[in-house]
Amino acid sequence: MTEEKKGTESHDPAYPEKFLQFMRTGWSDTELPVTLRAEAPNHAKRRAALSAAFPGETLVIPSGHEMVRANDTDFMYRPGSDFVYLTGEHDPESVLVMRPNGSGHDAVLYVRPRSPRDTDEFFKDRRYGELWIGRRHTLREKSAELGIETAHLDKLAELLDDLAPGRTRLLRGLDPHVDGLVRATAPERDRELAHTISEMKLVKDEWEIAQLQDAIDATVRGFEDVARIIPADRPVSERLIDGVFGLRARHDGNTVGYSSIVGAGSHATVLHWIRNDGRTTPGELLLLDMGVENRNLYTADITRTLPVSGTFTPLQRQVYDIVHRSQQAGMDFIKPGVKFADVHTTCMRVLAEGLHELGILPVSVEEAMSKESTIYRRWTLHGFGHMLGIDVHDCAHARHEKYKDGELDEGYVLTVEPGLYFQPEDELVPAELRGVGIRIEDDVLVTKDGAVNLSAGLPRTADDVESWFATQREQGPRLPA
């Protein structure tokens, strides 16, 4: 692609030479006043731990690139989580390269620095030009802010050509700048790199816990915003609720941590309902599963189920109380040394007992809970929770023995989110239960003394939910401050 065509589109004007000459003059060149980020030492420690796990091997971790949404427009960019975890960098097309130096690794961050003034990129290129997308950092500024050596992205190709394929580990599938390495690396060791980073993420440091609390606190405010615009006596659209929470997420954080689930009525029984094209109905329930991703990309994940009219019916409350008992049992059980799988069993047993109380379970609780049966799961489907952090489903590449079949440890953060869902067409439940879906989800930190509910700012019991909902409605709508 020629210099003239790079970064242009069919609807761009043909610039006359006089205009080009005029645009190339009269620009000052100032430095940004940057300082080392407070979290930079945390990222350095993570890189050191990764270095120790792969002695003598070159590690390549890309940030990823912008993805096309339609024609010449892109989705809002978010960097790869593993890359951010190791660098703190948020810009697209950046690549972390860690090369062995005999005693560890030299880490270099390859980035695209600010648009130069010796080419026309800064005013002509709509993908990289400074007048189109804003100013990027210089290499010096980026290094000073992140506490890592930086180099121009243009130098990466030459480096990659020189790497020894058998001793290079690549975190895959994220960036065209490193695609040429894919066929030259060993898949087994590349997977080991992904496993190792995920397992490093299991224990959150103090800074990460603070980021999660920040995201959770913003999410609490978002739930309050939503509660204040839901009338008790008439329908409103799920999209309105989705949008109100999205405003809070974008204002107080980066954006939502995942597509918000706004399930009115029977939509609450669809586990990943994100169409959000329904409407609330007084007398029915509204399930809200939403989380703010904060500006450092850590996310909350909270679910509440609200009675649209303001109070639960006796049957709704009975089911709600079963789910709450299940969640509380899981929280009470959590502490360092207990198995993740045993937390699941603890929560599920309470749900099975509740289904038996409702007269729905066709067998005994013991038979329903047996590994050969688990028929109680017809009405719950999912597990009790998952790890939470820089991803809503954090540590996803951790090995089973470290995560799903492993033990909890101090510093883990996980969700506890049991639920019961009675599908509208389920003929095995009473008609009055069909279309009822209830989930309660909170974000929990494992400490030496047990579980700490980081999302305790939102009520959980049926009585407290009703009282909180009434209070929010009395205060009325608000804009984020």
Image: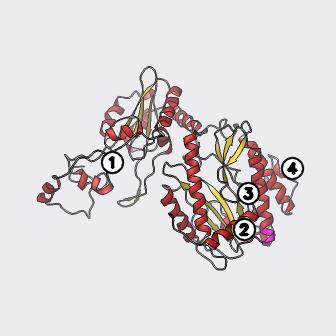
Q: Nearer the viewer, mark 1 or mark 3?
A: 1
From the image, tell me which residue sits under label 1.
136
Q: Residue at x 62, y 68 (%)?
A: 227
The dot on residue 398 is: none
Residue where numbered disc 4 is placed: 366
Task: Write the start and end of the magenta stretch as one range.
Answer: 310-316
Decide: marks 2, 4 in contact (CB < 8 A)? no
- What amino acid is at disc 4? Glu
Q: What is the crowding at mark 2: few (fewer than 14 residues within 10 Å), some, or many (at least 20)?
A: some
Check contact, mark 4 vs mark 3: CB within 8 A: no
- Give x and y (percent) for residue 115: 27, 48
- The residues tagged by marks 2 and 4 sit, at their Cα atoms, a distance apart of 34 Å
Question: Compared with residue 410, is residue 325 higher up or lower down, i.e. above or below?
Answer: below
> Which is more foreground, mark 1 or mark 2?
2
Q: Nearer the viewer, mark 1 or mark 4?
A: 1
Residue 361 can be seen in this image? no
Amino acid type, label 1? Arg
SS assignment at label 1: loop
**Marks 1 and 2, Cα distance to the nearest angstrom?**
49 Å
Which comes sooner in the sequence, label 2 or label 4?
Answer: 4
Q: Farthest residue in the right direction?
A: 364
Q: Which residue is mark 3?
A: 380
